[in-house]
Image (spheres, rainbow, N blue to C red):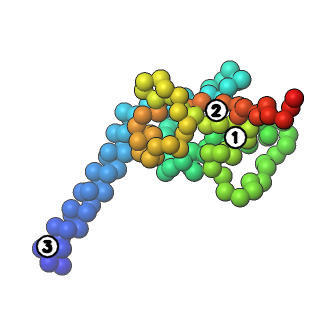
Amino acid sequence: MSRHEGHSMHDAQLSLSAAAAADDVASKIVPPVTVVLEGRCICHRIRLHEHSGYESLAEALHRMFVVDVNESYGHGHEEKEGRLDLSNAVPGHVVAYEDMEDDLLLVGDLQWNDFVRVAKRIRIIPAKRSSRGKH
């Protein structure tokens, strides 16, 4: 192994350990986000930086609010039809978030890393039903 290759390997190991250290620091600095399902008095907390993106978040929300509820009522696991995303993570609900300025925005509108940085609370709100055609 040449001297240059040894430095490259050492540099790669240092950058990997630096990335791991940065993740460890992020887990200590970035607080968990509160997840509120409107109509329930119990909140959950989730560490957004531990998720790889919106699909991973959708799966976690589905486990929190759909699978757990069905199991407690004796329904067992429901089979997911197709891919799980934010639009169907909690059926009949819209997933929104409050940012640092207390604005309420739809989850998924920002790039994942930007969302993780600015979200301080996730709110799962019942979807409004259309009142058209009910006259």
Q: Is residue 121 above or below residue 18?
A: above
Q: Residue at x 37, y 45 (%)?
A: 23
Pick out the residue farthest to the left. Answer: 3
The residue that disc 2 covers is 124
Q: Is residue 45 above or below residue 56?
A: above
Circle 3: element type: helix
The residue that disc 3 covers is 4
Residue 112 x, y percent position in the rendering: 46, 46
Q: Is residue 121 above or below residue 78?
A: above
Q: What is the quadrant of residue 83 in the picture? A: bottom right
Mark earlier in primary sequence (1, 2): 1
Say which quadrant the C terminus sits in. top right
Q: What is the quadrant of residue 122 in the picture? A: top right
Q: Residue at x 74, y 38 (%)?
A: 92
Number of residues whose C-alpha sits closer than 10 Å to that of mark 1, classed few (under 14), some (14–19) or many (20 or more): many
Circle 1: element type: loop
Q: Is residue 68 visible?
A: no
Q: CA distance from mark 1 to mark 3?
A: 53 Å
The residue that disc 1 covers is 90
